[in-house]
Image (tube, rainbow, N blue to C red):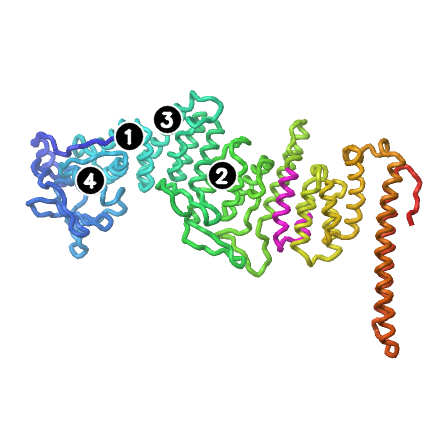
Amino acid sequence: MQKLILDGQENTSDHHESDENHQNHDQCIVVPTMLNAIADGFIKKEKSWFATSQLPSDLSIRVEDITFYVHKYPLIARCGYLNQIELHEHQNSHLGYDIKLEKFPGGSETFETILKFCYGLPISLNPANVAALRCGSEILEMTEAMEEGNLISKTEAFFTFVALSSWNDTIAVIKSCEMLSPWAENLQIVRRCCDSIAWKIFRENSSGGEIITNEGTWWFDDVATLRIDFFMRIITAVRVKGIKPEIIGSCIMNYGEKCLPSIYGDTKGMDCKNGTNRRNDSQWSITSGRIVETSIGQNKEQRTIIESLISILPPQKETVSCKFLLRLLKMSIVYAASPALISELEKRIGMVLENASTNDLLIPTYAVGEQTINSNEEQTIHNIDVVQRILDYFLMYEQQKLQQQELKSTTLNISKLFDSYLVEIARDPNVSITKFRVLAESLPRHVRTCHDGLYRAIDTYLKTHPSLSEHDRRRLCKIMDCGKLSLDGCMHAAQNERLPMRIIIQVLLSEQVKMRAAVHGKDITESDDNSDKENSWSSTKNEVKSLREELENVKIQMTELHRDYSELQQEYEKTNNKHRSPWTSGWRKMKKSALFIRKMIEDETQEGENKVKPGRRTQSIS
């Protein structure tokens, strides 16, 4: 850091010309040279500063909560603002001060430095205070018209020729401007700093190659410590100069990682203003369907950061990772960002959805601020509607690829991701069967080459919702193709008591076909497509034989069940010969239902056998 020591002592000048001006302008006061050095320094007593001088002070100025007791003449000699006002009208003895400077740039510390300059005492200029001194001297009108070499010209020269020539000094100056609005903006200090930073970045990266290296990202951490509006201006300036979109996207992701808070309270973020680690401003927890704010956070500031980052994202597809986009989307929903920006973000995620992970897609339902959760309504833990829209955008982009005859398609890679997501939301007891089915059927059937992931999601849903009716279970299982289950999947499904009986029979048939294909070393897909050519009548007879054996086993079990039922009925009739019980009609109904179940199994087996015999006449198993 560079700094400059200035001596504010006045040079000797011709006072005859000043005397003439005094005669022409009654309000202009000529200050003798000797009065500029009437103080050796300042001493502080509680919340007051006193100029150490043998002459008593005749002016008190309040800045913030500090009162400065000074002399009039050294100030009005160099400050046009104090020279123009009538000081006697500001004698407010009952208030404890004569003049009060509201919202002075840099506060009492900057005003103390200006007072030292007015008294001719040496001051230090450095990148941390030059912007504040430049703004303060502008307010006090410390121009060259008041005195040659006044504070405005000295601070301007230091800022232009010293601070802007160094990267670190420029960063320090623009960080000091965060508390100097709007003076720093009006004096073009922020704009000049942003232009200087952008030029230095372009100069260092202009000789780099196409690959982003550590040498090309040296400036990421420095600009990540700036306020979001300054960061946006730097990114805009860098983009205009032609920096690669990949570098800009990496810089935005680095800024988001350091400045965006976590949704959960177990991680630390970085304060973008101070550049130091801190706990997140806001930490949230879900209790009884309501959002509980565990610490006072600046929600508006976080919303501004999120919306700003979304608005400056490069339009190119691969410049920002899908993981970062989904994190932005989660934070946008939590902090109730603009719906238009959220929609644009969803479309952007749909373009790179194949690069997402299951955890990234688990987007919370709750929000902060404008949106609240009604505890009386059943709310899902995760926002399924958002994922549904993202999937629709993804399928739309894939359809456009097919129309443009692009050979590369990512629909096959999305099925595993989507089935894993279905498993996660199936664990939520508040997810309705209709919403689950609609989401599962959103993915075209030809995309899923294997239905093991879908079967796992259905089984998880049945396990989480044990009270589903038989009709709902059959309706849910219809979205699964038993023919696309692997051999392990078939073996598991055949023993799954949560599946309907009809689905189990279909699984058994599919399992037999797959076992035969595994023995003969044939691919099941080729066997299904070319079954008329490759399947012989002998293999069909073997399948029928195996089905007969399974049917005989079922018949034996049904016979044993019927025998036990008959014995129980006879024993019951013996004990109740005299008093007929109304249970008799119930036993008859049970008997008829047992016979009906037996008949249904025989019909299902007959139907399966007819499907196995292609091109042959139908034979009856029973």
Q: Secondary structure at mark 3?
A: helix
In percent of width and height, residue 385 lies at 61, 47
The amino acid type, in three-letter code, at marker 2 is Ile
* Neighbourhood count class around disc 4 (C-alpha, 10 Å): few under 14, some 14–19, many 20 upward: some
The amino acid type, in three-letter code, at marker 3 is Lys
User: Distance of mark 4 from mark 1, alpha carbons?
Assistant: 19 Å
The residue under label 3 is 200
Determine if the magenta segment contains residue 419: yes
Q: Residue at 45% across / 39% down in the picture?
A: 257
User: Distance of mark 3 from mark 1, alpha carbons?
Assistant: 13 Å
Asked whether the beta carbons under mark 3 and mark 1 sit within 8 Å of each other, the answer is no
Q: Residue at 51% across / 38% down in the picture?
A: 324
In percent of width and height, residue 556 lies at 86, 55
The amino acid type, in three-letter code, at marker 1 is Ala
125 horizontally vs 289: left or right: left
* Neighbourhood count class around disc 3 (C-alpha, 10 Å): few under 14, some 14–19, many 20 upward: some
User: Which residues make up the magenta segment?
Assistant: 414-437
Q: Secondary structure at mark 4?
A: helix
Give the answer, above or below, for where 175 lies relative to 464: above
The residue under label 4 is 113
Q: Main secondary structure of the magenta part?
A: helix
Determine if the magenta segment contains residue 530: no
Q: Earlier in the sequence, mark 4 or mark 3?
A: 4
Q: Nearer the viewer, mark 4 or mark 3?
A: 3
Give the answer, above or below, for where 377 lies relative to 147: below
User: Distance of mark 4 from mark 2, alpha carbons?
Assistant: 42 Å
The residue under label 1 is 163
The residue under label 2 is 310
User: Distance of mark 4 from mark 3, alpha carbons?
Assistant: 31 Å
Q: Secondary structure at mark 1?
A: helix
Q: Residue at 86% across / 37% down in the picture?
A: 539
Q: Residue at 64% across / 46% down in the picture?
A: 422
